[in-house]
Image: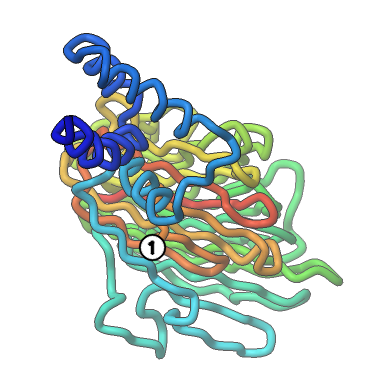
Amino acid sequence: MRRPFLLLSILIPFFAIILTYYKPDILQILTTYTGTTILTLTTHLTSLTTNPNITTPSHMNTAKTTMSRTLHHAKITPHLSSTRGHSDHGWLNTYHSFSFANWYHPSYTSFGSLRVLNEDRVKPQSGFPTHPHRDFEIFSYILSGELTHRDSMLTKGAEGDNVSPDQFYRMKRGDIQFTTGGTGIAHSEFNEHRRDTVHFLQIWALPWKRGLKPRYHTRHFSEEDKRKGFVTILSPLKGGVDATAEQEAKAEAVVEGTIPIHADFLMGAGIITGGDKFEWIVGGRGNVTEQNKRKVFVHLPMTKGGKASIRLDGRDDAVLKEGDGAFIEGVNKGDKLWVESVGEVEAEVVVLDTA
């Protein structure tokens, strides 16, 4: 008689642990393949695991979080705000996620096609005077305030109703201004507002070939859409690296409604309410990008006074605070990256997806 009780004393803790994680599957197996004694035990254990007065141990919660990962094969390395380059020039307060100007860090020189990510604040009545760009894809993402773009061929005071956005555009929150530097282009970016500081991201990507025809694009992406999920902002030019002159002239992106970029590159943005999570499909939905093996950089801008925070792929060691970024490596086209807002307030998140 002692042996059954000895057996049960061993089995009870074993099944309790198993049921904690795999309760539905184990119950089905036990119901199908075991006798009355084990079924009685199962019923008792089920009541324990579903009782709201019994708290799951913290180490078991951690195990569940680990099991919720979808990118088991991916490496996620946070790039903390404190490790960025920083310069305060008075009129310009700037943070560099990658080596830029006088700041150099051997670990942060580029990431795939991504070369520059600066988070800038420019005071009123100041800015970047006319300056050239060449052989880079450059885009400014406005977070608050306004930034005025002028092509070098347009002098201040010559603006009018017939001036195209390529020549003159006053960008506000939700706008993005994109420049293909190509063989050479010059423009100015100035905060002409009398009172408000402009806060924006300036991002540079390496194009798939040099000597492209210079071009501007300016577009607005609505706040409402960004609250529904990640909105794709940039996608590769139709025709790719071998695009014809006609395709270059049409300047159509692979993803309709996005700005075309001369790179195997996507940019997305979303505004995630606290407790919610958005899904980013690596490489885009469908046949959008070329390379299967990809890298993703996620950035959380400093927009909420330090109250916003996100968690990547359900990992407790991949929680980002404002100003932080993260390198995500070892991912493939079609993989799903979940970004969860875990701070006190909503989080505006930028995703840069590159080959």
Q: What residue lies at 39% left-to-right and 35% top-to-bottom?
A: 251
Q: Residue at x 67, y 46 (%)?
A: 163
Q: Residue furthest top?
A: 32
Residue 253 image offset from top left, x and y in percent: 38, 33
Q: Percent from the top left, x then y, of residue 44?
A: 41, 26
Q: Is residue 53 shown above or below 346?
A: above
Left or right position of 355 against 222? left
What x and y, as percent, mark residue 50? Answer: 50, 30
Give the quarter of the image for residue 228.
top right
Residue at the image position 42 percent from the left and 46 percent from the top: 267
Mark 1 closeness class: few <14, some 14–19, many ≥20 residues within 10 Å: few
User: Is residue 183 visible to us here?
Assistant: no
Name the residue rendered at 46%, 76% in the picture. Answer: 96
Task: Report which quarter residue 220 is drawn in.
Answer: top right
Residue at the extreme front of the image, as rendered:
1
Depth check: give the residue in front, 37 or 32: 37
Residue at the spot of label 1: 317
The vertical placement of 28 against 193, above or below, is: above
Along the viewing direction, whichever of 223 and 305 lies nearer the viewer: 305
Instruction: Give the farthest residue toward the right.
Output: 195
Q: Is residue 86 above or below residue 45?
A: below
Q: Quadrant of residue 195?
A: bottom right
